[in-house]
Image (tube, rainbow, N blue to C red):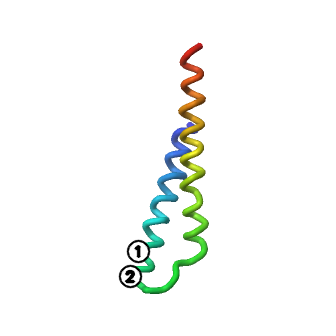
Amino acid sequence: MLLRIAMGLFGIGIISVIAIFAVTLITGNAPGVWLYLLAMLTPVGLLLGIFFALWSGRQARK
């Protein structure tokens, strides 16, 4: 469950980073603040994924 959440947050973050560049290239205007806020989900998803990997590795040793 945690891995799926981490992948979802990371995916949303990466898509928003791509959208930031696309909006800038296509329109020439600065993208909205909401895209920047969504881009901040990328490191959150990455950290959750690392936490899941470490946590599941500890459980396998028992």
Mark 2 neighbour density, 10 Å: few (under 14) some (14–19) many (20 or more): few
For marks 2 and 1, give the CA distance: 6 Å
Label 1: element kind: helix
Q: Does 22 sit above or below residue 42?
A: below
Depth check: 38 or 28 in front? 28
Q: Position of residue 17 (x, y in %)?
A: 48, 65
Q: Quadrant of residue 19?
A: bottom left
Depth check: 57 or 15 in front? 57
Mark 1 neighbour density, 10 Å: few (under 14) some (14–19) many (20 or more): few
In the rendering, which numbered label is found on residue 57? none
- Residue at 57% over, 31% down: 54
Label 2: element kind: helix
User: Which quadrant: the C terminus?
Assistant: top right
Q: Position of residue 18 (x, y in %)?
A: 43, 66
Q: Which residue is mark 1?
A: 22
User: Which quadrant: the N terminus?
Assistant: top right
Q: Position of residue 60 (x, y in %)?
A: 54, 18
- Residue at 45% over, 62% down: 15
Q: Position of residue 11 (x, y in %)?
A: 47, 54
- Residue at 56% over, 15% down: 61
Q: Is residue 38 left or right of residue 17?
A: right
The amino acid type, in three-letter code, at marker 1 is: Ala
The amino acid type, in three-letter code, at marker 2 is: Ile
Q: Which residue is mark 2?
A: 26
- Residue at 52% over, 78% down: 31
Mark 2 in CB contact with mark 1 (< 8 angstroms): yes
